[in-house]
Amino acid sequence: MNSALKGMPLVAVIALAMAGCARDGFYDDRNLDYAEARKGAPLVLPDARNPNRYRDAMPVPEVSGTRPAEDGVVEAPLPQALSPGRARERGYVELREIGSDAWLVVGLAPASVWPELERFVSRRGLDVTARDPGRGILETDQARFSIRQGLRSGDSEIHCERGGVAEAACLTALERYFQSLSASSSAASLTAQRPEEQDRARFEQRGDDWRVILPFGVDRLWAELSHQLEIDFAVEGRRELIDSDPAAHAFLVNYLTLSERERGLLSSLASLDLVASPRLVRLELEALGSEETVLMAVGVGEAGQLSGEDQRELIERVAGLLR
């Protein structure tokens, strides 16, 4: 053996031997190939080719920057929630209330809820006076039941009313009935109401301010957001629900805005101390019509109004809670 290798451990000898054959042996180091690669001439197809036989294998849309908004309006699907919130199983049942109105939200599509509602009415011995599966309406001698697509995808809303007023006892009975159902008992009915197509959220920029128009009535939207904010805005020092005002359709939250998070990150990198602090923000809902509501984020206190970027990021998060 070479005298230079006599004092080397066996592992080091093996590593040295393998390194020697890494380029041309069985252990080819492709990193060197990439480093030494040179750009070649582009492939040119003959002019006599049949163009119908060729296309892009992975076409990429041609985009030059961000598409400008028309009249300050940008249409976009409702964004996904940035945090999972409370995990739910399909079939959950929850009560929603605003003022004297109340209804149930069930984690099933209307097509699955309808046959169960018919079973509930039958087991209660109620006489059906009118039935319209397409509209999700079932009228009996004691109450009027109605089903509609929920604000969140895959949810349904169930109303039970007498003379246009919510029946608390009826809703309680319905809640217990749906809670008792097993997942296997909720089969879809082909004749039931089909979930209506979810409309798009419309983000509008007016000057430096942003707002989003959501395709829901203001009372329904406030009730659902009240519930979702209680779940998601419960992180101390980052996002907290402080107060709710059903009469004004507004919420008061403490929120660590995007600009504060970025400022805190830069400060922490420089001083190892996170100095970002949450802002007091008022989330306001304003009805535009029976099925359209504007959501806005307004800064509260001495700090003044939020920047446009902070407004957009916050209302995207809140709107995302509806998915």
Image (spheres, rainbow, N blue to C red):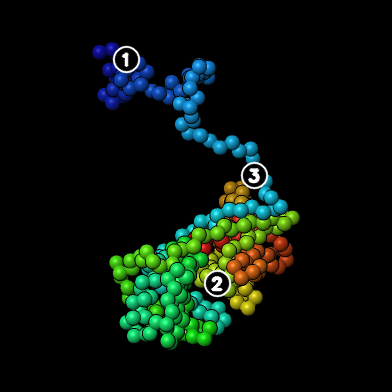
Residue 263 x/y as whole percent: 63, 52
Left or right, residue 318 beside residue 204: left
Find disc 3 in the rendering and name its residue.
Answer: 67
Residue nearest the viewer, comparing 94 with 21: 94
Quarter assignment of residue 99: bottom right
Find disc 2 in the rendering and name its residue.
Answer: 220
**Mark pair 1, 2: CA separation:** 83 Å
Residue nearest the viewer, comparing 141 with 82: 141
Quarter assignment of residue 273: bottom right
SS for dot 2: helix
Q: Is 32 above or below relative to 138?
A: above
Residue 149 x/y as whole percent: 48, 67
Residue 318 x/y as whole percent: 56, 62
SS for dot 3: loop
Task: Identify the residue at image location x=45%, y=26%.
Answer: 53
**Mark pair 3, 2: CA separation:** 32 Å
**Mark pair 3, 1: CA separation:** 67 Å
Task: Identify the residue at image location x=40%, y=23%.
Answer: 30
For the residue marked with disc 1, what is the amino acid? Ala
Q: Earlier in the sequence, mark 3 or mark 2?
A: 3
Left or right, residue 318 beside residue 128: right
Q: Is 162 above or below relative to 30?
A: below
Residue 119 can be seen in this image: yes
Find disc 1 in the rendering and name its residue.
Answer: 4
For the residue marked with disc 2, what is the amino acid? Arg
Residue 183 can be seen in this image: no
Task: Identify the residue at image location x=59%, y=36%.
Answer: 62
**Pointer 1 with pointer 2, Cβ within 8 A:** no
